[in-house]
Image (tube, rainbow, N blue to C red):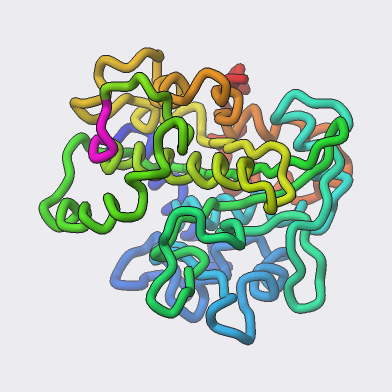
Amino acid sequence: MSAFQQTEQAHQLEYLKRPCFEGLTGFHDRAFQFLPDYAHWNLAEPIREKARDLFNHPEPEHEIHWHTYASHGCSSQACCVNFLLPMADKPDMLSLWVDHVLGLQGAKVVPIETRSGTDWSLAFEWFPPTDYLNEANKKGIRPRGSNSTSVDAALQFDYNGEHHLLLIEWKYIEKYGSTRTAKDIAGDPTRDKRYSNIWKRPHGPIRSDTSLKLQDFYLNPWYQLLRQQMLAYHAENDPFSGFDRATVLHISPGGNDALKRVNGAAFQDCEGSNLFEAFRNLLDPQLSDRFRSITTEAAFAPLAGWPEADWLPWLRDRYPNLFAMQAMEHNR
């Protein structure tokens, strides 16, 4: 366990000892995990019902799946929802946030989907309607949030006469190893069939002169980074998608140094001081700005100056270490 993981788990354990959570935690004897019937308590009180409305759907194929450990105190999915869901029905605020994280001025967020009769400016566990990565099951279905490539959140906006897609990937305490298990390797033939013709230029985002093989990318987090960048690339290059530009924005805590380390023997010679720089340098030079990374601290620094960000005190209480550090300069 990394130092950052230890710090965050210790805080969440202490946080969940508060009287309001008594009797709600202890799933599988884990003090930091909510019991199934109380998993929604992992979210801020004002957004619990909103999250239920957004994730549930009368048709199972349109339901948004919660991750296996979404009820964990250190769940990255719950963390993402806690930070972003309060803005999902506030397009003006979300537009200001997009300007901030992308260094723009004048972005205008527009609804990305309608669920249960409500327009949402932000979608969770989202993927494009078209199965660009050949991942649908035999029934032609891709579950949102499981067994298919999605992003933690997505939005669309207009800027300078162009229609943009922003795919957001969220990390919290994650770190990754340098080897793969035999069970994971057994799935490589399926991965080869899906991605072999869509990952590298001229038919994918990775630069054509790389000596890396597709199979090298099957090690996480490279595997996830590649699949999400392929989603962005093919959505942008599909003339019927409606998007002029598609960008992946990776958000993670500045203190999670273990996440930023370049893992895997095949990637040790990649240029870049950290994982995110190394991955961006593997993209075709014309596409290098389609991948951005920013610290959680920097991404949400403006909330302190927005009076309507009334959920900020709760965030600071729940995730103090994501606000205590000085906001770090992010990559553009």
Q: Could one spot residue 270 in this view of the protein? A: yes
Q: Quadrant of the C terminus?
A: top right
Quadrant position of residue 196: top left
The residue depicted at 35 percent of the width and 19 percent of the height is 209
Q: Could one spot residue 326 in this view of the protein? A: no
Quadrant position of residue 206: top left
Q: Measured from the top left, where is residue 249 in percent x and y?
A: 59, 36
Q: Measured from the top left, where is residue 230 in percent x and y?
A: 48, 42
Q: Nearer the viewer, residue 285 or 120?
A: 285
Q: Nearer the viewer, residue 279 or 75?
A: 279
Q: Quadrant of the N terminus?
A: top left
Q: Nearer the viewer, residue 18 or 136?
A: 136
The residue depicted at 61 percent of the width and 30 percent of the height is 297
The residue depicted at 66 percent of the width and 32 percent of the height is 299
On whether residue 215 falls in the magenta region, the answer is: yes
Q: Is residue 100 left or right of residue 254?
A: right
Q: Would you place residue 106 above or below residue 171 in this image?
A: above
Quadrant position of residue 123: bottom right
Q: Nearer the viewer, residue 93 or 317?
A: 93
The residue depicted at 57 percent of the width and 21 percent of the height is 286
Q: Would you place residue 23 above or below residue 242 in this image?
A: below
Q: Measured from the top left, where is residue 323 in percent x and y?
A: 61, 33
Q: The magenta stretch spans which residues? A: 212-216
On whether residue 316 falls in the magenta region, the answer is: no
Q: Measured from the top left, where is residue 316 in percent x and y?
A: 64, 42
Judged by its main secondary structure, the magenta piece is helix
Residue that sits furthest to the bottom in the current view: 58
Q: Is residue 227 left or right of residue 77?
A: left
